[in-house]
Amino acid sequence: MFFQQFSNLLKGAEEIRFCIRKGDDGRLAVLVEPLLKGSPGGEDEATGQLRAALAFPLRIAATAGELDARFLQSLMAYGQAREPAADAFAAALGSAKEALKPAAQAALQAKPAAAKAGKDSGEAETPADWSANPESLF
């Protein structure tokens, strides 16, 4: 059940950073930090706020016994609190992808026309780079 909770947290993230450090007082500090895919930037304010909410880490400082007794419940509550933001973030990204489809289609249709115009004028054709950017949200 422990790893099932981590799996549930991965809805809006590709990775989770999990760190445990022992303090001078003997307590353990546990950090669960979602690392979201893609890079921030170029987003509207609402989407940026959703990204910030999803990236907010869970930090708990407690004794080992307290963590054994209550960490799983804390992790479950953290995941449940993130669900509305994860759903809204996915919807915002889906809307952005849909909004960009007409522009992408127009660019694809313009490519053959531009290539034909270049051949007609005697100019050398420069191939476009349509490779996928692994850091892109789209």
Image (cartoon, rainbow, N blue to C red):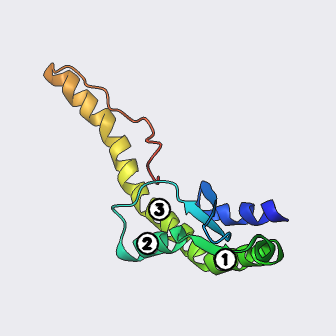
Q: Residue furthest right?
A: 1
The answer to which of marks 3 and 2 sits earlier in the sequence is: 2
Identify the image quadrant of residue 26. Answer: bottom right
Give the CA separation, mark 1 to mark 2.
20 Å
Residue at the spot of label 3:
98
Q: From the viewer's perspective, is residue 121 above or below residue 25?
A: above
Q: Quadrant of the N terminus?
A: bottom right
Give whichever of discs 1 and 2 has the lower sequence position.
Answer: 2
Q: Is residue 67 left or right of residue 88?
A: right
- Callout 1: 10 Å neighbours few (<14), some, many (20+)? some
Q: Are marks 3 and 2 in contact (CB under 8 Å)?
A: no
Disc 1 marks a residue whose amino acid type is Tyr
x, y percent for residue 10: 66, 61
Q: Residue at x 22, y 22 (%)?
A: 119
**Disc 3 to disc 2, how far (Cα)?**
15 Å
Residue 113 image offset from top left, x and y in percent: 28, 35
**Residue situated furthest front in the rendering:** 24
Label number found at residue 47: 2
Q: Nearer the viewer, residue 38 or 122?
A: 38
Residue 14 falls in image quadrant: bottom right
- Residue at 62%, 59% in the rendered image: 19
Q: Residues within 10 Å of mark 2 (few under 14, many from 20)?
A: many
Camera-nearest residue between 46 and 115 = 46
| Structural distance between the alpha carbons of marks 1 and 3 | 30 Å
Q: Which mark is residue 78?
A: 1
Q: Amino acid at mark 2?
A: Thr
Please, what secondary structure does the residue beneath circle 1 have?
helix
Q: Name the residue type under label 3.
A: Glu
Task: In the rendered view, tell whether residue 107 sits above or below residue 44.
Answer: above
Bin the neighbour count of mark 3 within 10 Å (Cα to Cα): few under 14, some 14-19, many 20 and up.
few
Res 94 label: none
Q: Secondary structure at mark 3?
A: helix
